[in-house]
Amino acid sequence: MPRRQINPAQDSQRQGLRLVGGVFAAVGGVLTAIGLVSFFGAFGGGGMPQYFWCAFLGLPLLGIGVALLKLGYLGSVTRYVAGEAAPVATDTLKFMLDESKDSIRDVASAVSTGLFKQGAVSTRDCKKCGKQNDADAHFCDQCGAALPTEHRCPKCQKQNDGAARFCDGCGERLAAD
Protein backbone atom coordinates (compact mmCIF):
# COMPACT_ATOMS: atom_id res chain seq x y z
CA MET A 1 0.00 0.00 0.00
CA PRO A 2 1.66 3.26 -1.09
CA ARG A 3 2.06 5.95 1.54
CA ARG A 4 0.47 9.32 0.95
CA GLN A 5 3.20 11.95 1.09
CA ILE A 6 2.83 15.67 1.64
CA ASN A 7 6.14 16.37 -0.10
CA PRO A 8 6.53 14.42 -3.37
CA ALA A 9 10.32 15.00 -3.33
CA GLN A 10 10.61 13.44 0.12
CA ASP A 11 12.13 10.15 -1.09
CA SER A 12 14.95 11.89 -2.98
CA GLN A 13 15.58 14.27 -0.06
CA ARG A 14 15.72 11.34 2.36
CA GLN A 15 18.19 9.50 0.12
CA GLY A 16 20.29 12.68 -0.14
CA LEU A 17 20.38 13.09 3.64
CA ARG A 18 21.40 9.46 4.07
CA LEU A 19 24.15 9.71 1.44
CA VAL A 20 25.60 13.06 2.55
CA GLY A 21 25.27 12.11 6.22
CA GLY A 22 27.07 8.81 5.61
CA VAL A 23 29.92 10.56 3.76
CA PHE A 24 30.32 13.23 6.45
CA ALA A 25 30.21 10.61 9.23
CA ALA A 26 32.77 8.39 7.47
CA VAL A 27 35.21 11.24 6.69
CA GLY A 28 34.74 12.68 10.21
CA GLY A 29 35.33 9.26 11.77
CA VAL A 30 38.53 8.70 9.78
CA LEU A 31 39.89 12.17 10.57
CA THR A 32 39.00 11.80 14.26
CA ALA A 33 40.72 8.42 14.37
CA ILE A 34 43.89 9.82 12.71
CA GLY A 35 43.99 12.74 15.15
CA LEU A 36 43.47 10.56 18.23
CA VAL A 37 46.04 7.96 17.11
CA SER A 38 48.58 10.75 16.53
CA PHE A 39 47.81 12.28 19.96
CA PHE A 40 48.01 9.06 21.96
CA GLY A 41 50.98 7.81 19.93
CA ALA A 42 52.98 10.79 21.15
CA PHE A 43 52.79 9.48 24.73
CA GLY A 44 55.03 6.51 23.84
CA GLY A 45 58.03 8.74 23.19
CA GLY A 46 57.15 9.49 19.56
CA GLY A 47 57.56 13.23 19.98
CA MET A 48 54.93 15.88 19.31
CA PRO A 49 51.62 14.75 17.74
CA GLN A 50 51.69 15.86 14.09
CA TYR A 51 48.10 15.08 13.04
CA PHE A 52 46.19 16.01 16.18
CA TRP A 53 44.51 18.81 14.22
CA CYS A 54 42.62 16.11 12.27
CA ALA A 55 40.56 15.37 15.41
CA PHE A 56 39.49 19.05 15.59
CA LEU A 57 38.25 18.82 12.01
CA GLY A 58 36.91 15.27 12.26
CA LEU A 59 34.72 15.62 15.37
CA PRO A 60 32.47 18.36 13.94
CA LEU A 61 32.21 16.47 10.62
CA LEU A 62 31.28 13.32 12.53
CA GLY A 63 28.61 15.22 14.49
CA ILE A 64 27.13 16.78 11.33
CA GLY A 65 27.15 13.38 9.59
CA VAL A 66 25.34 11.69 12.50
CA ALA A 67 22.75 14.50 12.61
CA LEU A 68 22.07 14.16 8.86
CA LEU A 69 21.76 10.39 9.21
CA LYS A 70 19.26 10.87 12.04
CA LEU A 71 17.15 13.09 9.78
CA GLY A 72 17.46 10.62 6.91
CA TYR A 73 16.27 7.69 9.01
CA LEU A 74 13.81 9.57 11.26
CA GLY A 75 10.69 8.38 9.43
CA SER A 76 11.78 4.74 9.45
CA VAL A 77 12.68 4.85 13.14
CA THR A 78 9.43 6.64 14.01
CA ARG A 79 7.33 4.09 12.10
CA TYR A 80 9.17 1.27 13.86
CA VAL A 81 8.64 2.81 17.30
CA ALA A 82 4.97 3.46 16.53
CA GLY A 83 4.58 -0.14 15.38
CA GLU A 84 6.06 -1.34 18.66
CA ALA A 85 4.18 1.10 20.92
CA ALA A 86 0.70 1.00 19.36
CA PRO A 87 -0.06 -2.65 20.26
CA VAL A 88 1.05 -2.00 23.85
CA ALA A 89 -1.22 1.05 24.08
CA THR A 90 -4.10 -0.92 22.54
CA ASP A 91 -3.61 -3.81 24.98
CA THR A 92 -3.47 -1.38 27.90
CA LEU A 93 -6.69 0.33 26.83
CA LYS A 94 -8.48 -3.01 26.36
CA PHE A 95 -7.30 -4.17 29.79
CA MET A 96 -8.51 -0.95 31.43
CA LEU A 97 -11.90 -1.22 29.73
CA ASP A 98 -12.32 -4.90 30.63
CA GLU A 99 -11.31 -4.33 34.25
CA SER A 100 -13.51 -1.26 34.73
CA LYS A 101 -16.62 -2.63 32.99
CA ASP A 102 -18.06 -4.14 36.17
CA SER A 103 -17.30 -1.00 38.17
CA ILE A 104 -19.05 1.19 35.62
CA ARG A 105 -22.04 -1.18 35.66
CA ASP A 106 -22.13 -1.00 39.48
CA VAL A 107 -22.05 2.80 39.44
CA ALA A 108 -24.81 2.94 36.83
CA SER A 109 -26.89 0.52 38.90
CA ALA A 110 -26.36 2.58 42.05
CA VAL A 111 -27.39 5.76 40.26
CA SER A 112 -30.45 4.01 38.84
CA THR A 113 -31.39 2.64 42.26
CA GLY A 114 -30.94 6.07 43.78
CA LEU A 115 -33.29 7.56 41.23
CA PHE A 116 -35.92 4.93 41.93
CA LYS A 117 -35.65 5.43 45.70
CA GLN A 118 -36.04 9.19 45.36
CA GLY A 119 -39.33 8.74 43.58
CA ALA A 120 -38.29 9.38 39.99
CA VAL A 121 -40.18 6.18 39.18
CA SER A 122 -42.44 4.71 41.86
CA THR A 123 -44.06 1.30 41.81
CA ARG A 124 -46.25 -0.91 43.93
CA ASP A 125 -45.93 -4.68 44.27
CA CYS A 126 -48.94 -6.95 43.84
CA LYS A 127 -49.54 -8.97 47.02
CA LYS A 128 -50.86 -11.91 44.97
CA CYS A 129 -48.22 -12.41 42.22
CA GLY A 130 -45.39 -9.98 43.18
CA LYS A 131 -45.46 -8.04 39.87
CA GLN A 132 -44.40 -4.39 40.05
CA ASN A 133 -47.12 -2.00 38.94
CA ASP A 134 -47.29 1.75 38.52
CA ALA A 135 -47.84 3.62 41.78
CA ASP A 136 -51.22 4.94 40.65
CA ALA A 137 -52.53 1.54 39.40
CA HIS A 138 -55.61 0.10 41.10
CA PHE A 139 -55.32 -3.40 39.58
CA CYS A 140 -52.30 -5.65 38.85
CA ASP A 141 -51.02 -5.69 35.24
CA GLN A 142 -50.12 -9.41 35.58
CA CYS A 143 -52.97 -11.11 37.42
CA GLY A 144 -55.71 -8.45 37.60
CA ALA A 145 -55.94 -8.57 41.39
CA ALA A 146 -56.99 -5.40 43.16
CA LEU A 147 -53.98 -3.59 44.57
CA PRO A 148 -54.29 -2.59 48.21
CA THR A 149 -54.86 1.05 48.85
CA GLU A 150 -52.26 2.90 50.82
CA HIS A 151 -52.60 5.94 53.00
CA ARG A 152 -49.90 8.53 53.61
CA CYS A 153 -49.66 9.72 57.19
CA PRO A 154 -50.43 13.45 57.33
CA LYS A 155 -47.91 13.91 60.15
CA CYS A 156 -44.76 11.98 58.99
CA GLN A 157 -45.65 11.23 55.32
CA LYS A 158 -45.02 7.47 55.72
CA GLN A 159 -46.99 5.14 53.42
CA ASN A 160 -49.28 2.82 55.38
CA ASP A 161 -51.44 -0.12 54.35
CA GLY A 162 -55.01 0.85 53.49
CA ALA A 163 -56.43 -1.19 56.40
CA ALA A 164 -54.10 0.38 58.99
CA ARG A 165 -55.75 2.55 61.61
CA PHE A 166 -52.49 3.94 63.04
CA CYS A 167 -49.30 5.06 61.27
CA ASP A 168 -46.40 2.58 61.17
CA GLY A 169 -43.92 5.46 61.42
CA CYS A 170 -45.20 7.75 64.18
CA GLY A 171 -48.33 6.09 65.65
CA GLU A 172 -50.64 8.93 64.53
CA ARG A 173 -54.28 7.92 64.10
CA LEU A 174 -55.15 7.62 60.40
CA ALA A 175 -58.44 8.88 58.95
CA ALA A 176 -60.87 6.11 58.06
CA ASP A 177 -62.01 5.79 54.39
Image: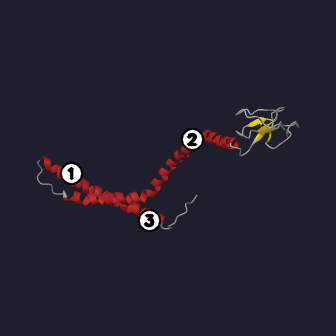
Of mark 3 and mark 1, the one earlier in the sequence is 3
Position of residue 63 in the picture relative to residue 160 (left or right): left
Q: Amino acid at mark 1?
A: Val
Position of residue 69 in the picture relative to residue 173 (left or right): left
Query: Disc 3 versus disc 2: distance between alpha carbons?
Result: 42 Å
Classify 10 Å Cα crowding around label 3: few (below 14), some (14-19), many (20 and above).
Answer: few
Q: How is the image coloured?
A: secondary structure
Q: Could you tell me which residue is drawn at 43 percent across and 62 percent down?
A: 15
Query: Disc 3 versus disc 1: distance between alpha carbons?
Result: 36 Å
Residues tagged 3 and 2 counted as in contact (Cβ below 8 A): no
Q: Nearer the viewer, residue 134 or 82?
A: 134
Q: Which residue is mark 3?
A: 13
Q: Nearer the viewer, residue 37 or 8?
A: 8
The percent coordinates of residue 93 (x first, y second) are 56, 45
The circle on residue 95 is 2
Q: Could you tell me which residue is drawn at 23 percent across and 55 percent down?
A: 34
Query: Disc 1 versus disc 2: distance between alpha carbons?
Result: 56 Å
The image quarter containing residue 126 is top right
The percent coordinates of residue 158 (x first, y second) are 72, 38
Q: Is residue 127 above or below residue 60?
A: above
The image quarter containing residue 59 is bottom left
Position of residue 26 in the picture relative to residue 160 (left or right): left
The percent coordinates of residue 91 (x first, y second) are 55, 43
In the rendered image, the quadrant that contains the C terminus is top right
Q: Amino acid at mark 2?
A: Phe
In the rendered picture of this protein, how many numbered marks are placed on residues? Answer: 3
The circle on residue 37 is 1
Q: Secondary structure at mark 2?
A: helix
Q: Amino acid at mark 3?
A: Gln
Classify 10 Å Cα crowding around label 2: few (below 14), some (14-19), many (20 and above).
Answer: few
Of mark 1 and mark 2, the one earlier in the sequence is 1
The image quarter containing residue 74 is bottom left
